[in-house]
Image (tube, rainbow, N blue to C red):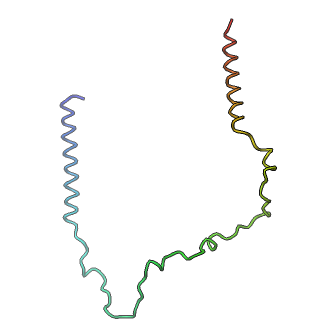
Amino acid sequence: MPENRRNIFIIGSAAGALFCLCIIIAVVVLYEPPRPYDLPVLAEEGPYIPRISAYDFAVPDEVERFLSPRPVYFREPGSPWTEKDTRGFWEDPRELAASVLKRQNRIKLDDILRKVP
């Protein structure tokens, strides 16, 4: 970008920012809050209305039972698994990693040995 165009761009950006800032200041200064006579007037006397405290909005104790009732199952849940039940599904992560490394190393060695005359 030529130096002259760059200066014009910087001056234009600064002027735009200054214009926006002037608009914001004008809106803040000229904004008029609502007049007091526009607001509803509260009666000085009348029936006693008790004040509401923050404790009126407190969650009651044992609400967990109310909000989350016991689920209805299609069938009764089974008993928890024992170590004997899970033994057939267990795979040692170290053995898995070793088998992956063994396979990768075997492929690399085969590639190297194929290249040997």
Q: Residue at x 20, y 51 (%)?
A: 19
Q: How many marks?
A: 0
Where 53 sits versus 67, above or below? below
Give the residue at the far top of this rendering.
117
Q: Residue at x 31, y 83 (%)?
A: 40
Where residue 81 sits, quadrant-wise, is bottom right
In terms of depth relative to the viewer, which is nearer, 70 or 47?
A: 70
Give the percent coordinates (x, y) of residue 13: 22, 43
Where 106 sits versus 50, above or below? above
If the image is split into quadrants, where does the N terminus sit?
Answer: top left
Q: Residue at x 78, y 50 (%)?
A: 83
Where 82 sits versus 46, above or below? above
Left or right of 25 on screen, residue 97:
right
Left or right of 30 on screen, residue 87:
right
In terms of depth relative to the viewer, which is nearer, 117 or 16?
A: 117
Q: Residue at x 19, y 46 (%)?
A: 15
If the image is split into quadrants, where does the C terminus sit?
Answer: top right
Give the percent coordinates (x, y) of residue 52: 43, 82
Give the residue at the far bottom of this rendering.
46
In terms of depth relative to the viewer, which is nearer, 87 or 62?
A: 87
Give the percent coordinates (x, y) of residue 85: 81, 50
Where residue 32 sits, quadrant-wise, is bottom left
Left or right of 67 on screen, residue 92:
right
Give the percent coordinates (x, y) of residue 68: 64, 69
Where 22 sits versus 36, above or below? above
Where residue 54 sits, quadrant-wise, is bottom left
Left or right of 93 on screen, residue 26:
left
